[in-house]
Amino acid sequence: MSKMWKRALTIFMAMIMLCGFALPAELGLADGDEPVELTIFMASTRPMNECTDLTRQYVKDNIAVDMNMIQGDSTTFDQQLALYVSGGDMPDVVLCSYATYLGYAAEGAWADISPYLTDDLPDLMTYVGDYWPYLTVDGAIGGVPRLLNVPSSHVVSIRKDWLDNLDLEEPKTLEEYTEVMRAFTFNDPDKDGKNDTYGLSAAGYSYLSFLMGAFGASSERDYFLNDDGTITTNAISEEYRDALRYLNSIYTEGLIDPELFTCTYEQAQAKWGRGEMGIWSNWWSHAGNAYYRFDFGNLQPDAVVTHLLPPVGPEGKSGNLYATPFDAVVSVSYLCDQAKIEAALRLLNFNASPLGFRVLMYGIPGEFFEWDEANNMTTWTTELNGGVSKSGKYTTTDMEVYKLLYQERWQGQSDALYSGPEGKLWYGGGELRYQEPVREDVFCMFLTDEYIKYHAELDSYFKTSMIAFIMGEKDIENDWDAYVAEYMNMGGDIERQSQLKVYNDTFNTQCVFAE
C-alpha cells in the first residue's frame, strides 16, 4: 500500500461529493422494479431451509435483491475462488479474507464501488466509518469490510460444577489456572470414578493465546508496540518462547487434551458435550452454541458453565488474542454491471441497518420477531410462543445463511433475551470480549506486497513449529535458534521490515524492532 493512501482517498471522495464527478443513478427503488439476482459466494456451513427461504423472499420483496447463495468450503475457499476467476465465471459478491481481497484488488478483479458511495447509503456509510482507506487499492474501492470492532473474540469457558465438586475457586492467576487444570485432570471432577477428563482443551491452537498472554505473547504472528517505542516480533520473541515453555510443561504433564491440535470445531464441540474437559478456550459464542446446536443440555444436564477472564502471569501480564478491526471483505466482482453494483450496495446497506441486520441474522419480522423502531427494541416471538414462530409453523433454526456483515455489540445484547443457558452464555461471552485485556497487533492492517508474498508460508511454519514445540517434537532450548533463523530466512525479516516502513510512514514515527 502507498503511504499516501489516506490522503488520496480523502481527495478522491471530495471529488465525488463536491466536483462534477458523474454519479450513478440514485440507489433508491421505484415501484415495480424487478429484483436483481446476485450470486453470493462465501464459506458457510449454515443450513438453508424453509425459514431461510422466507428471508430470501423478504429481501426480494423489500429491496429487490435476489440472493443466490453459493456455499463454499472454508478449507479450500481460496482455491475455489481461483477456479471461478480463471474460468471467467466469478460470482457477483464474494466474502473473502482481507489478504485475499488485497491480492485480487491488485489484479483488478473487483469493481470500483467508490463512485456509488453516497448519502443514498446512510447505514452503510455509518457502519464503515473511517475504514474505507484500508479498502483502497490504486485509487479504487472494491468491497466493504466486515467489521468486528471488539478487543477480542476469544473467551474461556469453565465447568463451574466441577469447581464446586472439588471445592475450588474460580482461577485468576496463571498459577491458580494451572492448579485447576491439574485437579480437573487427575481428581475425577465429574465424580464418575473414571480417569477420563482433561484440564484444558480448545477450539484450535490459536485459542491457547489466553495462556500465552500471561507472558506478554500470543498464538499468532503479532507485532506489539512497547512503551519505549520499540516493536516486538511475537514469533521470535523471548516472551513467546517463555509461553511455549509453559505450554510444553502442562502438555507433558498431561493437562492438555492432545487432540485439540487436530480436531475440527464440530469434534471439539462433541468432546465438550461428552464432558472431556473442564476449561475450554473458544470463540465467544461456542459455549452457547453447545446448548443451541449441539445438545449440550441433554448430554451434560448437571453442567454449570461460566466464562472467565484470562489469567494474570507472574509479572502482572494478561491478555487474550487481539481481534483485528475487520477480518474479511464483502467484495464486488469486476464482471458486475451498474445494476448489480447498486444491488450489492443496497443489500449491504440493508444488512448494516438495525432492521436489516435482524432480518439476515434471525429471520423475517412478524414471524420470528417484532421490532419497535422508535425504541430500538426487539421482541422475540419464539420466546413468547413456546419456541415456535408467530404462526406456529416454524421452530427456531440457524438463520444466519445470508448474513454478510456483523453488528456484534447489538448481537450480544440481543442474546440476553434468550431465557435458556445458551442465551446467558452468548451474552456473557459477547460482553466479556469488551472487558478482556489484549495487546494490539499494530501491523494487522498493513498487508504489504511482501506480506502477501510471504505470509502463507510463514503462517504455516509458525503454526507447525508452535505445535512441535508444545508437543515436544522440537526442543525449545536446543532448536530455538534454528527456528528463528529459518523463520527470518523464509521472508520473516523482509515482511516485517516492509510493514514497519508503512507503519512509520503512516503514523510519522521512527519505531524500530525490539530484538
Image (cartoon, rainbow, N blue to C red):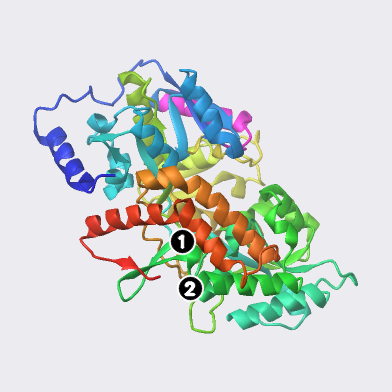
Foreground label between 1 and 2? 2
Q: Are marks 1 and 2 in contact (CB under 8 Å)?
A: no
Query: Closest to the observer: 491 or 427?
Result: 491
Residue furthest toward the right? 193
Percent of width and height locating residue 395 = 66, 39
User: Which residue is denoted by mark 1 in the rendering?
Assistant: 322
Q: Nearer the viewer, residue 473 or 17?
A: 473
Magenta residues, start to end: 44-62
- Rendered view: 284 above or below 213: above
For residue 313, side relative to residue 350 (left or right): right
- What x and y, as percent, mark residue 164? 74, 78
Name the main secondary structure of what is drawn in magenta: helix
Q: Secondary structure at mark 1?
A: loop
* 388 relative position to 5: left or right: right
Q: Quadrant of residue 334?
A: top left
Vertical position of residue 222 compared to residue 263: above or below? below
SS at badge 2? loop
* Residue on which disc 2 sits: 216
Kind of residue sitting beneath label 2: Gly
Residue 397 location in percent, x, y? 63, 40
